[in-house]
Amino acid sequence: MVRLATLIALLPALACAQAPLPPAAKPPATVAPIAPAAAAAPVAEGNAIRVLLAPELETTLVAQTAARIDRLDATLGQPVAKGKLLVGFECGEAQARLRMADAELAAARDALTGKTGLKKLNAAGDLEVSTAQANVDRAAGAVSLARAQAGHCSVAAPFAGRIARVHVRQHQGVAAGAPLVDLVGDGPLKLRLNVPSTYLRQLKTGAAFEVAVNETGRTYPARVTAINARVDAVAQTVELEARIDGRPAELLAGMSGVARFPFAP
């Protein structure tokens, strides 16, 4: 009986041992790693040098007094003539100070005239006349100061050009020194570029070269106008300035391109 019970207990284990094993899972196929794309090699351009077109004259006009903008005659890209009023401020206080200074000057001059007449009659001394003259000079100085302060109430274009940026809006209050308008001259553009210092062996002021401007897709003749007196010791380059022959109307400040010289470094 004991043997029979033991045999019955071992039957499940024997059945499991004789059951066929499930097929082994196939290892996943090895996927060849994708090699990273190689960085594109720079295009060889020979003696090509990057160049930037810059205006001969450019400036940022700022407020010379703290006031509220009463007039704004400046829009992006607008051509302006030299002396054109661009920004006007509300300056009633400054104008009032100028009128007061004018009145004080007129009174001082009348007093001087009276003292001078009395001196001729021996009714006034030299000291009184000198004091009256000093009052006139002081009043004249006050008028000059008030007129200069009143002159800060308007900002005019210092040269002919075009509006590159407007920093303010109509009726906006600004502090002294706040930027108002960026102005670039409408004269011929100059080129700025850095060339290898080895170019100095052949490079002279007046040397001719060509400039291919990216934005226009055209090539223009140019000439070197200035060579920096110092070589960048780290980059081993020297800064140049140049001009494009003529004044092509399609060129604007900020454009860039490639300059090619007729000699190798």
Image (cartoon, grey):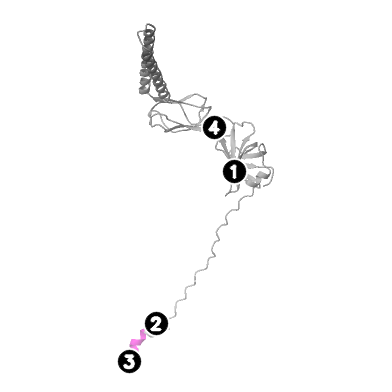
Segment tinted magenta in the rendering: 4-12
Q: Is residue 153 left or right of residue 247?
A: left
Q: Residue visible at 63% across and 41% down? A: 259
Q: Residue visible at 33% across and 90% down? A: 6
- Mark 1–mark 2 Cα distance, whole angstroms, equals 91 Å
- Mark 1–mark 3 Cα distance, whole angstroms, equals 109 Å
Q: Position of residue 114 (x, y in %)?
A: 36, 9
The residue wearing badge 4 is: 57
Q: Position of residue 109 (x, y in %)?
A: 39, 13
- Mark 1–mark 4 Cα distance, whole angstroms, equals 23 Å
Badge nearest the viewer, 2 or 3:
2
The residue wearing badge 2 is: 16
Estimate how packed mark 2 is, as few (under 14), some (14 to 19) or many (20 or more) residues with alpha carbons within 10 Å: few
Checking the image for residue 4, the label placed there is 3
Q: Is residue 250 visible?
A: no
**Does 248 sit above or below residue 42?**
above
Residue at the farthest left position: 1
Identify residue type, mark 4. Answer: Leu
